[in-house]
Structures are given as structure tokens and as C-alpha cells.
Image (cartoon, grey):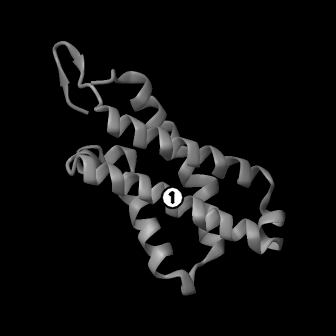
Amino acid sequence: MNQSSAGPEALPPQIRLRLQDLLDQAGKAQRLVARGRAAYDGDEMLRLAAESLLIRMGACVERIDKTDSGFVAGHPDLELRQVKDTRNLLAHGYDIVDYALVWSILESNIPVVADKVRRVLDATPTA
């Protein structure tokens, strides 16, 4: 993140809104994971919901790219590019989705991304 002597660079309102949207979707993913792997494996609708949540999170990143094409590339530590890549894979490869991998991403990766995004939102002022 760019910093000047005055402190961290302010986040534009649109970027802040999209990052908060991503956190909202990550919270839904956390609630889905809390149901447990057995419930996920046994319920097609939970698996489809998981897929949809990852697609929505990727859409949040895509909107960030449209607002500020340099934000995602300028913050590789947030792992937003990977979120967007996951969205593209799920949206365009719907017929080859590996639901064990989707579970793993929701259980392991998304909480890490959400924590990083939360820290950025907490540490930066609004423009």
C-alpha cells in the first residue's frame, strides 16, 4: 500500500464499497463452511451456493478493476487476483467444477483474504 508522510493513502469510496461487498460475501461463505463438510458434500444446493459465493466475490474484484485498474495489481498481498481467477474458472468451466477444491478455497483461502481486506479497510481512511 502506498504511504506518504501523512499516513496511508485514502481508499476511494467505490473501492471501499466493493471491498466491503467482498467481506459480506466472505461472511456468507463462513456461515456455509460452519455447516460442515458432510453437509456440503451431501447437499447439492450448498455446493451450488458455495460456487455462487465465489463467483460473487470475483465479481466484486472485477468491479474494483473497472473502477481503478491499478488497485488489484498494486495490492498483490490481498490475493484479489486469485479471487477473480477463481470466479472466471467457475463461471466459464461450470461443467468441470471440482467441489472438493471449492470447499478448500472457502474453508482455507477466503478467511485469509477476508482478514487481509478487513485490515486494509480498518487502516485506511475514505477519500
Secondary structure at badge 1 equals helix
Q: Quadrant of the N terminus?
A: top left
Q: Is residue 53 left or right of residue 81?
A: right
Q: In this figure, which residue is indicated by the disc labeled 1?
A: 56
Q: Which quadrant of the view contains residue 77?
A: top left
Residue at coordinates 59% horizontally, 64% vertically from top-left? 52
Which residue is at the front of the view, 102 or 90? 90
Furthest-bottom residue in this view:
95
Furthest-top residue in this view:
6
Estimate the x, y position of residue 82 in percent, counting from the top left. Answer: 40, 60
Q: Is residue 103 left or right of residue 59?
A: right
Name the kind of residue labelled 1 in the image.
Arg
Q: Residues within 10 Å of mark 1 (few under 14, many from 20)?
A: some
Estimate the x, y position of residue 31 in percent, counting from the top left. Answer: 72, 48
Vertical order, 70 against 39 (above or below): above
Residue at coordinates 21% horizontally, 51% vertically from top-left? 69
Q: Is residue 6 left or right of residue 124?
A: left
